[in-house]
Image (cartoon, grey):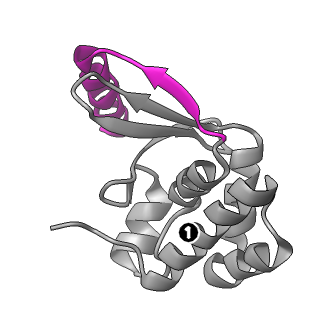
Amino acid sequence: MAVVLPAVVEELLSEMAAAVQESARIPDEYLLSLKFLFGSSATQALDLVDRQSITLISSPSGRRVYQVLGSSSKTYTCLASCHYCSCPAFAFSVLRKSDSILCKHLLAVYLSQVMRTCQQLSVSDKQLTDILLMEKKQEA
């Protein structure tokens, strides 16, 4: 079963991607829509994108994870395929309280895809496993 974002978010990201492809910038009305949907997380996510804090890590088997260097200098792992982030805000605001649909790190991942500013890193399957296991150890 595929996990999808709400239709309004999917549509906004799609329109933003088209605008970026056409003019290499995001029009103000889309930025206002982001702010309306995500509040202060939108600005924080855009800041992460501007600082090039998002890295796509891919392996030969096709597995893909994103790592986002947060504003606190801690690295969080995001899985865009299932809309997951390892940050405490995601666990609390998204999963537990349902106050938000995304944390700033996951929103930054989607915005970096739209803006094509994501750093790329190819690693072996073993290295990717080690990265994920290291993240799990840091959480414990």
Q: Residues within 10 Å of mark 1 (few under 14, many from 20)?
A: few
Q: Quadrant of residue 27?
A: bottom right
- Quarter of the picture containing the N terminus is bottom left
Check disc 1 and report its element: helix, strand or loop. Answer: helix
131 falls in the magenta region: yes
Q: Residue at x 44, y 62 (%)?
A: 90
Q: In which quarter of the image is residue 44?
A: bottom right
- Place of residue 124 in the rendered image (x, y in percent of width and height, measured from the top left): 29, 15
Relative placement, left or right, of 52 versus 12 is: right
Asked if residue 121 is positioned above or below residue 119 in the image, the reply reads: above
Which residue occupies the extreme front position in the image? 22
Which residue occupies the extreme right position in the image? 28
Q: Quadrant of residue 133?
A: top left
Which residue occupies the extreme left position in the image? 1
Relative placement, left or right, of 1 versus 19 is: left
- Place of residue 76 in the rendered image (x, y in percent of width and height, measured from the top left): 48, 42
Which of these two is toward me, 113 or 19? Answer: 19
- Place of residue 38 in the rendered image (x, y in percent of width and height, measured from the top left): 62, 76
Task: Identify the main secondary structure in magenta.
Answer: helix
Q: Residue at x 74, y 75 (%)?
A: 30
Q: Residue at x 38, y 38 (%)?
A: 65
Residue located beneath label 1 in the image? 14
Total count of labels = 1
Which of these two is toward me, 28 or 50? Answer: 28
Which of these two is toward me, 50 or 68? Answer: 50
Q: Which amino acid does label 1 sit on?
A: Ser
* Segment tinted magenta in the rendering: 117-140
- Place of residue 126 in the rendered image (x, y in percent of width and height, measured from the top left): 23, 16
2 falls in the magenta region: no
Q: Which residue is drawn at 69% across and 47% down?
A: 48
Asked if residue 85 is positioned above or below residue 35 in the image, the reply reads: above
Relative placement, left or right, of 75 versus 92 is: right
